[in-house]
Amino acid sequence: MKLILLGAPGAGKGTVAKQLTAIDGSVQISTGDILRGAVQAGTELGKEAEGYMNRGDLVPDSLIMGIMEKRLQEPDCQSGFLLDGFPRTIPQAEALKVILNKLKIKLDMVAEIDVPRDVIFDRLCTRRTCENSDCQAIYNIKSMAPKKEGICDKCGSPIVQRADETQEAIGHRLDTYNEKTAPLTGFYKKEGLLKTITGTSSEVVVSAIKAELKK
Ligand code: ADP
Ligand code: ZN
């Protein structure tokens, strides 16, 4: 499948993407994971991106497009991909359209995961992420705690609160989403690709996406 997952921070894009990859081997491409990996590795990209990320601001479109143009041409994308956290602005969506046309790739659907803001705010405050950049597993201290407190079940590294998961940065990320990313629903509606799915459980969202893909 070739899918874009749209939705506010904390809507569950990452969790849904992981469940969908298990169906047909499509790869999850999360620009947030790529950027956090670069910050941890201390690369040029990481150094440029870090300040924006910690404030809860978007990284400039030019940086993101450079990453994604290359990423989409890697061989593992041929069997399908789930874009998680990209595109995030109208210019990114327009640039993506040009790249996909050039590569002769057709998207199946843009799935918007719609979750109420208070649920999201709550989730982000209690979210914890594995600090190992090759893992980045996600936990929630209220609803999905690791077996051993503070330790990742999958790789044994410490799980931490992300630098952009202070109350202030979370509020800012949600505002940025409403201002810059929410307009993408109009963009993809015009393209005839948008499906909006309302649901707070990833299982429900995954089944709805599967059902849409069968149509
Ligand atoms: P979330 O969806 O929880 O906000 P992500 O992991 O998708 O988290 O992104 C974390 C941060 O990385 C964003 O706040 C932003 O600074 C940066 N980022 C990720 N994807 C993009 C993108 N497509 N365009 C611009 N910045 C991005
Ligand atoms: Zn881990």
Image: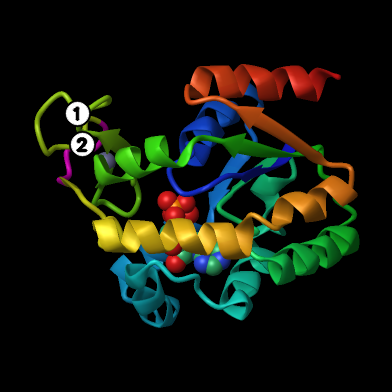
The residue shown at (37%, 58%) is 171
Q: Residue furthest left?
A: 149
Image location of residue 84, percent across then percent down? 57, 47
Q: Tag 2's secondary structure?
A: loop
For mark 1, does the 10 Å Cα neighbourhood hold few (<14), some (14 to 19), or many (20 or more) residues? some
Closer mark to the observer between disc 2 and disc 1 = 1
| Residue in front for this viewpoint, 109 or 118 | 118
Is label 2's Cβ within 8 Å of ligand 2?
yes
Asked which quadrant contains residue 169, the reply is bottom left
Q: Residue at x 24, y 58 (%)?
A: 166
Above or below, comparing residue 214 to residue 80 in the picture: above
Q: Tag 1 or tag 2, which sits nearer the N-term?
A: 1
* Residue 3: x %, y % from top left: 71, 41
Instruction: Magenta stretch: give its range.
Output: 154-158
Residue 202 in percent (x, y) is at: 50, 24
Amino acid at the residue labelled 2:
Cys
As drawn, 193 above or below 92: above
The rendered magenta stretch, by its main secondary structure, is classed as loop
User: Residue 120 lies in what quarter of the image?
Assistant: top left
Q: Which image quadrant shows ligand 2?
A: top left
Residue at image mark 1: 146
**Residue assigned mark 2:** 152
Q: Are marks 2 and 1 in contact (CB under 8 Å)?
A: yes
Magenta includes 180? no
Q: Residue at x 72, y 66 (%)?
A: 90
